[in-house]
Image (tube, rainbow, N blue to C red):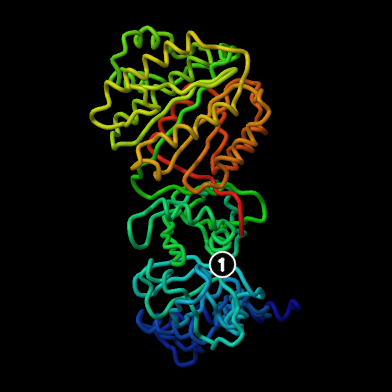
């Protein structure tokens, strides 16, 4: 701007300022005044701008050549369109589908149309989260695409829906994370009709491969109930490992070895044979005493054997005791639990080293655990202490001990013979007979009413051999790290008959 223009502009501005205070306003150029708008109208304008997708933004002042221009026109605004709303990725979308209940579908698997599937994923299978808009119930199910299914429909097995009270319409969304593979599962089994629990358990033992195929159709959740009508089985998932967080999903995958166990859902009467190794190696003093006080109290309440208190004195936390002492303690705890339960189950005891012997009471190879059995249990405990002191050998003849089990079974009361039988074999070494597996295969393998568990103490246990014989009979090999773990395992086994399932047929 030239010096002359600056002088002219200053004089105009001075004149404008001077005239603004004069009463003579006729010759003054005043910009039009804009009345203030009511708050209600301003709010309405803001809402209108949101609806049509525009934004008001402050603009920089134009580069006026004169200051009077800036004084008159002030700050300026411009209107620009709002940025577009990004589309929702298909994996995050929700669909609302009508529910069609089916009785002939694979349990656990829902079917949707290809058109609906393509709205949420490029895959033909996966996991869906189903939510009922009426009552906020939600479940997770595996899904598959059914080409001929009508768009807007989802087909689900009636059993799944009835468990969760989902109605006619659901929203579905895709579960995007990789599901956790379950390694260890316990199933509680009961009959759909009738009360013969162990017959149902035995039926499942004969149909392991089919059971696994059914389980693989489900998203795993503790408390989930699966109905298998062909086997009259109501199957409830009670424990899974690893544990999952509330929003995580887990599935079965039996392409790799998994531990699958079943147990009766409810009280079940079963017989027991405890087999105890009393060979010289069982004098090894390497079993650490931990957490034994509750077990000591249970044994003291159950038995009145004269030498019991002296025996229990050595079990102080932190001590190391002989393997044989730990085995006796575990056997006493098992007997005390059976005496406490007192529902008429039979308990037998076999000891072995170079040879094997059944401990008998009143010339019977068993004691019946009921309200009248206290005297018989005390006689069995007394005999156990006496025999363990007198009869020891260098050998570990497991085969002879297991052969005596058959003698016990044949001599059980007729009313007890058809009851399930649990055998617990405790040892610290190798079978010196070299025919233990042969005996198990001949007498007990794959029999639906017999379970054989093995317990190994000390560092020289033949794990491979014990795993093989227990697997043949639906059992497990348990290797406790201390006496507390051993006692806890025996106490649990006294109350519960569980079976590890292995593929024995298809």
* Image location of residue 18, percent across then percent down: 50, 78
Which residue is more in the foreground, 495 or 130? 495
* Residue 333 at x, y percent in the picture: 39, 24
Q: Is residue 48 above or below residue 109?
A: below
The crowding category of the residue bearing disc 1, from other C-alpha atoms within 10 Å (few below 14, some 14 to 19, many at least 20), is many
Observer-nearest residue: 353 or 328?
353
Give the quadrant of the C terminus.
bottom right
User: For residue 114, what is the image quadrant?
Assistant: bottom right
Q: Residue at x 45, y 52 (%)?
A: 201
Q: Is residue 130 visible?
A: yes
Say if residue 80 shows up in the picture: no
Left or right, residue 333 beside residue 146: left
Name the residue furthest left: 371
- At horizontal 64% and vertical 35% (from top left) the residue drawn is 437
Asked where in the image residue 8 lies, by quadrant, the reply is bottom right
- Secondary element at tag 1: strand
Residue at the spot 62% in from the left edge and 13% down from the top edge:
394
**Residue that carries the numbered disc 1 in the rendered image:** 127
Q: Position of residue 462 (x, y in %)?
A: 66, 27
């Amino acid at each position: 701007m030239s010096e002359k223009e600056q002088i002219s502009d200053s004089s105009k501005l001075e004149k404008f300022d001077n005239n603004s205070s004069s009463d003579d306003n006729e010759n003054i150029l005043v910009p039009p005044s804009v009345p203030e708008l009511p708050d209600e109208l301003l709010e309405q304008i803001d809402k209108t701008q949101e609806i049509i997708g525009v934004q008001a933004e402050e603009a920089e002042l134009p580069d006026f050549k004169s200051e009077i221009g800036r004084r008159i026109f002030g700050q300026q605004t411009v209107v620009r369109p709002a940025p577009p709303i990004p589309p929702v990725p298909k994996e995050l979308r929700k669909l609302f589908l009508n529910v069609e209940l089916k009785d002939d579908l694979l349990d656990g698997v829902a079917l949707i149309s290809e058109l609906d599937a393509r709205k949420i994923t490029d895959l033909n299978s996966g996991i869906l989260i189903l939510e009922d808009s009426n009552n906020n119930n939600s479940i997770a199910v595996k899904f598959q695409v059914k080409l001929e299914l009508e768009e807007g429909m989802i087909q689900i097995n009636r059993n799944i829906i009835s468990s969760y009270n989902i109605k006619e319409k659901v929203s579905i969304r895709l579960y995007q994370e990789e599901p956790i593979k379950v390694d260890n599962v316990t199933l509680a089994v009961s009959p759909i009709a009738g009360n013969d629990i162990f017959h149902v358990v035995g039926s499942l033992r004969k149909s392991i491969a089919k059971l696994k195929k059914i389980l693989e159709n489900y998203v795993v959740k503790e408390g989930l109930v699966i109905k298998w009508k062909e086997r009259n089985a109501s199957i409830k998932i009670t424990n899974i490992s690893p544990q999952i967080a509330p929003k995580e999903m887990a599935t079965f995958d039996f392409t790799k070895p998994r531990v699958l166990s079943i147990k009766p859902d409810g009280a079940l009467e079963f017989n027991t044979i405890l087999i105890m190794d009393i060979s010289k190696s069982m004098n090894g003093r390497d079993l650490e005493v931990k957490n034994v006080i509750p077990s000591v109290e249970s044994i003291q309440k159950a038995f009145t054997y004269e030498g019991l208190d002296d025996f229990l004195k050595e079990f102080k936390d932190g001590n190391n005791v002989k393997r044989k002492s730990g085995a006796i303690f575990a056997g006493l705890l098992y007997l005390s639990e059976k005496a406490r339960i007192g529902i008429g189950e039979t308990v037998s005891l076999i000891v072995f080293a170079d040879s094997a012997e059944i401990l008998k009471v009143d010339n019977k190879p068993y004691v019946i655990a009921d309200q009248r059995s206290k005297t018989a249990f005390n006689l069995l405990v007394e005999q156990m202490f006496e025999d363990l002191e007198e009869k020891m050998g260098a050998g570990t003849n497991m085969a002879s001990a297991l052969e005596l089990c058959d003698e016990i079974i044949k001599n059980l009361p007729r009313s007890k013979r058809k009851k399930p039988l649990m055998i617990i074999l405790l040892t610290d070494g190798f079978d010196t007979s070299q025919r233990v597996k042969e005996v198990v295969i001949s007498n007990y393998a794959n029999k639906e009413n017999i379970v054989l568990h093995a317990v190994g103490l000390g560092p020289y246990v033949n794990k491979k051999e014990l795993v093989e014989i227990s697997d043949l009979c639906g059992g497990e090999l348990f290797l406790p790290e201390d006496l507390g773990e051993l006692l806890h395992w025996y106490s649990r086994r006294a109350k519960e008959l569980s079976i590890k399932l292995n593929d024995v047929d298809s």
